Image (cartoon, rainbow, N blue to C red):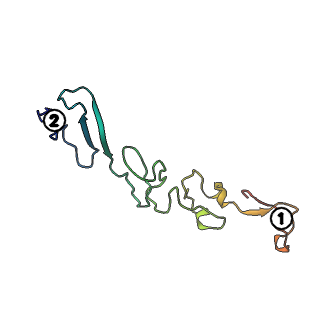
Amino acid sequence: MNKTADNDALQSSSIGSIASGGTTVCVKLNDSAGDSIATTITLDRLFLTAPLCPDLDGDGYPSTCTACNNPHCPALDCNDNDVLVNPDAPEGPYGNSTCSDNKDNNCNGLSDASEPACWPITLASGESNPGSGDIGTITSGAT
């Protein structure tokens, strides 16, 4: 950058072109001494914007957070082709269709019979019938 003699004038320089959709960098530099000598430069502002992360199914969750921006990052969509599958999707309770669809609906690595939210709730052996006023001990587990 070539500095003009006028210390109050806006000084600018081109650092090259930025491809469409690429990262944009805006830097404002301040010569605090005002003497046109490059001694100490203070960075006043830096704005970095990255392109939005791809979200093929439109559920708000991307399949990658690398070199892109998404408010859900670092949570990733484990199936970006199915709007009903994402880290915030429900899975369960027992009897719900999400417990028998062969999908990991909530992206936790478990599906259907492996998903604790899909396990049936049963009374522990020897407990009284909850319908009689005693709620008993409730346990859950795969059957």
Nearer the camera: disc 2 or disc 1: 2
Q: Secondary structure at mark 1?
A: loop
Q: Reading the chain from its start, which is encountered first: label 2 or label 1?
A: 2
Residue at (20% x, 32% y) in the render = 34
Q: Is residue 3 above or below residue 114?
A: above
Q: Position of residue 92 (x, y in %)?
A: 62, 63
35 displayed left or right of 80:
left
Horizontal side of 68 relative to 17 (left or right) equals right
Residue on which the image places disc 1: 136
Kind of residue at disc 1: Gly
Label 2 belongs to which residue?
7
- The numbered disc on residue 13 is none
- Figure quadrant of residue 103: bottom right
Give how far apart the Cα atoms at labels 2 and 1 are: 81 Å
Residue situated in front as seen by the camera: 71 or 85: 71
Relative to the observer, which residue lies in front, 12 or 125? 12
Please tell me whether residue 137 is drawn above or below residue 37 in the rendered image: below
Residue 17, x across and y down, in percent: 19, 41
Task: Indicate the secondary structure of the residue bearing disc 2.
Answer: loop
Between 143 and 117, the one nearer to me in the picture: 117
Q: Position of residue 29 (x, y in %)?
A: 25, 37
**Amino acid type, residue under disc 2 in the picture:** Asn
Judge whether 70 appears above or below 93 on screen: above
Q: Quadrant of the N terminus?
A: top left
Q: Which residue corresponds to the image point at 87% horizontal and 67% vertical from the top-left?
A: 128
